[in-house]
Image: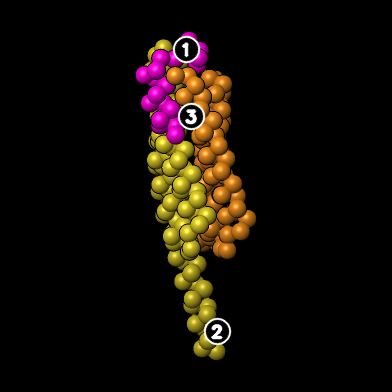
Chain colours: A yellow, B orange
Amino acid sequence: MTIADLPWWITLPAGLLLILGALLTLVGSIGMLRLSHFYARMHPPSMGNTLGTGCVLLASMLISSALAGRPVIHEILITVFIVTTSPMTAMLLMRAAVHRSGARAQRQLAMRQE
Amino acid sequence: MTEFLDFAVKFAQLCFALAMTCAAVRLLRGPAAQDRVLALDTFYINGMLTLLMLGIRSSTTVYFDMALLIALFGFVGSIALAKFLLRGEVIEP
C-alpha cells in the first residue's frame, strides 16, 4: 500500500492532527518571539513542544501503521522522550534564570552601597 | 482524500519553517543567555518535526532514526547549557 491509496478514515484524522500540531508549535514559537520578558517567554514553547509533538507523532504513527498493515508504534519512543525531558529542561533553565537575576541584583546592590 | 493529507503535510512544513525562523530570530537577538538556550531548545524540536514531515512525505522510516537522535542530543545540549548557566561548569568535580 502506498500513500496515494490510503482510506479516508486514516487520512482525515491524520491530516487534522498534523494541522493542529503544526498550529500549536507555530503559536508557541511566535509567543517565544513576541512576549516581553524571560519568565513570560518560558512557557509558550513548552506547550508547543509537548502537545504539538504529541499530535504530530500520533499522526505519523497512524500513517505508518496504515502503510505497513500492522501496528507500528516506535514513534512512542520520541513521545516518551520529549514528554519526560522537556519539563526537566524548563525547570533547570528557570532555576538558572532565577540564579542569574538574583546574582545581578546582588551585584547592583553592592555597587550602590560602595 | 489524499489531497487533504498532502495539503496538511505541506501546511505543517510551512508552519515548522516559520517557527524555526522565529526561534532563530530569538536566538540571534535574545538579550540574555537563557533566552538563547530556550530558543535553541525550540529550534531543535522544530527541526525534528520537520524531519518527521519529510519521513511522512517519502514514507520511509530512515528519517525516524535521525529524529530520535536529534531529540536525544538536543536534550543533552540544552541540559549542559542550562547547567553551565546555573553553576559555571558542566561536570562538577
Tell me: B66 left or right of A84. right
Q: Nearer the viewer, residue A93 or A65?
A: A65
Who's the residue at 49% across and 21% down the image? B3
Q: Nearer the viewer, mark 1 or mark 2?
A: 1
Q: State the image coordinates of residue A100 (x, y, percent, origin top left).
A: 50, 67
Q: Residue at x 53, y 59 (%)?
A: B34
Q: Quadrant of the C terminus of chain A?
A: bottom right
Task: Work out how far the residue at label 3 is from the one at label 2, CA to CA, in angstroms.
Answer: 57 Å
Dot 2 falls on which chain?
A
In the rendered image, which residue does mark 3 sit on? B8
Percent across and percent down for residue B41 are: 52, 48
The outermost residue toward the bottom is A114
Q: Judging from the image, what secondary structure is the residue with disc 2 in?
A: helix
Q: Is residue A52 above or below residue A32?
A: above
> Which quadrant would residue A42 be assigned to in this image?
bottom left
- Picture coordinates of residue B48, whole percent (x, y): 53, 36
| In magenta stretch: residue A16 | yes
Q: Which mark is residue A111?
A: 2
Mark drawn on residue A5: 1
Residue furthest to the right: B28
* Amino acid under disc 2: Met
**Which amino acid type corresponds to the residue marked 3 in the rendered image?**
Ala
Residue A58 to residue B21: above or below: above
Judge the density around disc 2: few (<14), some (14-19), many (≥20) Cα neighbours within 10 Å.
few
Up the image or down, A106 lies above or below A18; here it is: below
Disc 3 to disc 1, how far (Cα)? 16 Å
- Residue B84, by quadrant, is bottom right
